[in-house]
Image (cartoon, rainbow, N blue to C red):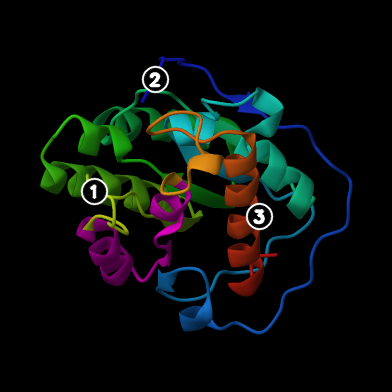
Amino acid sequence: MGRINRGWTNARRWPGPRWPAIVLLTLLVTGCGGGALEPLGPGDVILAFGDSLTEGVGATEENSYPVQLEALSGLPVVNAGVSGETTAEGRERLAEVLEDTQPSLVILLTGGNDVLRNQDLEEARRNLAAMIEMSRERGVQVVLVGVPEKSLFSRSAPIYGELAEEYDLPLIDGLVASLLRRPGYKSDAVHLNADGYREMAERIHRFLVEEGAL
């Protein structure tokens, strides 16, 4: 997905108040999947890990979803998106990023480049599973965001639901597909614009509140 940038940036720290935890309704939220999240405290870091949709290709840096999520949540959010990255490359990169950022929660949104390049999705599944296990071994909570297949009406590739069930993970299903079906939210065929990233940040934030993390 787009240009390759091997760096990641820390979003600014906003001093706003944390949102209170609310009733946990796992099956009645934007996504579906596993159990609820543990509450995050002041200063806990959220790691947004993925490819160009995390980096924010198609909009300015300040309009990327991690920067906007930081403003909404009042917690530091690290933008560790690398445009063009596959799940295999993300798997190689994640350990160092976890060590450098010490997050309490990872939002894992990757796999789009595997789909676009017609790569084996079973291999992508194994790579995603390795990233989930790598995070959990360090005591880091994981939220999985589904990526659609090459279909106009697709929600998410089946591997995301399978992984959410296997690892009892909260899954945000259908978000990326629904945004990419709306021309007003897109900068090109596979990337969002500022409005699209704002909507993504708002829906992820709402999911985290409903799952009890915020």
Q: Is residue 41 left or right of residue 57?
A: right
Q: Which mark is residue 80?
A: none
| Residue 200 drawn above or below residue 39 | above
Q: Nearer the viewer, residue 95 or 51?
A: 51
Q: Is residue 135 left or right of residue 155?
A: right
Magenta span includes 171: yes
**Magenta stretch prevailing secondary structure:** helix
Disc 1 marks which residue? 149
Residue type, label 1: Glu
For disc 2, the neighbor class at 10 Å (few under 14, some 14 to 19, many from 20) is some
Give how far across and how far down residue 15 sits, in percent. Answer: 89, 45
- Observer able to see residue 76: no
Q: Gap between marks 1 and 2, in whole Å?
A: 18 Å
Residue type, label 3: Glu
- Residue at (58% x, 65% y) in the render: 207
| Among numbered discs 1 and 2, the one appearing first in the sequence | 2
Marks 2 and 3: in contact by CB < 8 Å?
no
Give how far across and how far down residue 69 sits, in percent. Answer: 68, 47
Disc 2 marks which residue? 2
| Quarter that holds the N terminus | top left
Q: Nearer the viewer, residue 31 or 181?
A: 181
